[in-house]
């Protein structure tokens, strides 16, 4: 390499170092980048997800981000991978970035409470998405009617003949405050129809494999049960798999929620009785619209709001109605709405596919 080119290369390296030094590197560079975005006047929304293990969360994310962008907002999505401490750090990061709104799918209310309260003290709006944040005076809680979800599960079993029978309840994470709402709705229907709950189990962190392990470890109760209520379709997937190995799939009524594709496939196959379809697109769209309104200090429509009571606090609650799905209405609710494709739902039983 000639001397001329060596000198030129040296000048370029020195210039690059000076640019990095004057503009700031590492965290400072991130801060400068954020300020540049903020100067555009766009609403800044931070969104903290529990994880993307559950199928539906990816849909929520995509619809929320798309709707927010259409409304002129920017969304920073963070994934805590089921770790409450990581979610706490992500909320702190959003506070540091001075977000206008933070939307949280909480893992553990107690673990993030201090950070949520700090965000509100800093004037940042907080939306509890799909799950309430206990103890936090959130600006909005938006979810489905979770007690009604439980009622629908119970009613599907009763309609199928479960009266004076026996049932197992394999529920979701004990730190998810939606879980007791679903349990209450389901339990009420069971009591009204003289059905005995043999046992109640909670899968920590919504870990589906724990529900499958429960089946293997409690075959005495499984054999006595007429039906198994699963906290969601992910848990139901492991339950049905375990039942299949014991040659009990289709012989024990199984219910779940979320209308995951595999759950819809099991319904047409006959190994799951029902699921609860929750119009995720509507929930995510409403959440994004509400986030932008809150950021702009606009008042949310009182006609759409009810109240979620958290101790002495009353949180504005935007409640979306769920839909019970069985083999009788799966084509109408799931396929015609475009939630899943007909070819996918009937993949394993093409002979049943409607024309």
Image: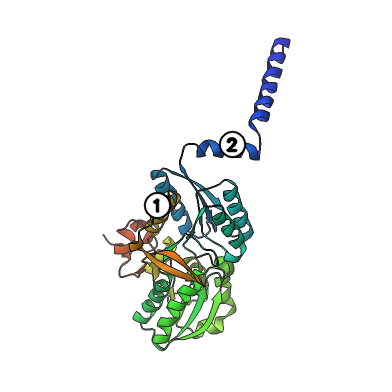
Mark 2 to mark 1: distance in Å? 29 Å
- SS state under label 1: loop
Neighbor class of circle 2 (other Cα within 10 Å; few <14, some 14-19, many 20+) is some
* Residue 17 showing in the rendered view: yes
Quarter of the figure with residue 201: bottom right
Residue of label 2: 32
Q: Which mark is residue 196?
A: none
Please determine whether, in this image, residue 124 is positioned above or below residue 34: below
Q: Quadrant of the C terminus?
A: bottom left
Mark in the foreground, 2 or 1: 1
Nearest the viewer among 204 and 355 is 204
Q: Residue 82 in the image: x percent, y percent?
A: 59, 60
Q: Indicate left or right for 90 with 333 as reference.
A: right
Name the residue located 28 percent from the left edge and 62 percent from the top edge.
354
Location of residue 138 in the rendering, given as x and y in whole percent from the top left corner: 50, 61
Pick whichever of labels 2 and 1 is earlier in the sequence.
Answer: 2
Q: Hey, which quadrant is residue 227 in on the image?
A: bottom left
Q: Nearer the viewer, residue 200 or 303?
A: 303
Q: How busy is the neighbourhood of tag 1: few (under 14 within 10 Å), some, or many (20 plus)? A: few
Which residue is disc 1 drawn over? 298
């Amino acid at each position: 390499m000639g001397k001329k080119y060596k000198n030129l290369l040296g000048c370029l390296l020195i210039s690059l170092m000076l640019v990095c030094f004057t503009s700031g590197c590492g965290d400072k560079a991130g801060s400068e980048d954020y300020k540049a975005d903020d100067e555009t006047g766009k609403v800044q929304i931070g969104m903290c997800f529990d994880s993307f293990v559950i199928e539906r969360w990816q849909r929520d994310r995509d619809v929320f981000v798309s709707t927010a962008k259409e409304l002129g907002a920017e969304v920073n999505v963070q994934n805590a991978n089921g770790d409450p401490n990581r979610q706490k750090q992500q909320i702190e990061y959003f506070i540091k970035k001075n977000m206008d709104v933070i939307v949280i799918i909480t893992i553990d209310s107690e673990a993030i409470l201090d950070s949520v309260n700090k965000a509100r003290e800093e004037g940042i709006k907080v939306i509890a998405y799909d799950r309430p944040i206990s103890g936090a005076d959130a600006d909005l809680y938006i979810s489905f009617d979770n007690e009604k979800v439980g009622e629908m599960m119970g009613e599907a079993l009763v309609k199928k003949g479960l009266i004076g029978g026996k049932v197992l309840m394999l529920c979701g994470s004990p730190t998810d405050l939606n879980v007791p709402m679903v349990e209450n709705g389901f339990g009420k229907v069971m009591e009204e129809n003289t059905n005995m709950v043999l046992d109640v189990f909670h899968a920590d962190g919504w870990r589906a494999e724990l529900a499958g392990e429960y089946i293997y470890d409690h075959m005495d109760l499984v054999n006595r049960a007429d039906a198994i209520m699963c906290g969601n379709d992910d848990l139901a997937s492991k339950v049905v798999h375990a039942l299949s190995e014991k040659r009990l799939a289709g012989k024990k009524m199984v219910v779940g929620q979320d209308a995951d594709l595999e759950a819809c496939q099991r319904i047409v196959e006959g190994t799951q009785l029902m699921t609860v379809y929750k119009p995720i697109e509507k929930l995510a769209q409403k959440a994004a619209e509400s986030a932008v309104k809150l950021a702009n200090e606009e008042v949310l429509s009182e006609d759409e709001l009810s109240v979620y009571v958290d101790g002495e606090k009353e949180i504005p609650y935007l409640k979306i109605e769920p839909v019970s799905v069985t083999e009788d209405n799966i084509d109408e609710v799931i396929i015609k709405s475009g939630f899943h494709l007909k070819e996918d739902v009937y993949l394993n039983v093409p002979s049943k596919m409607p024309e």
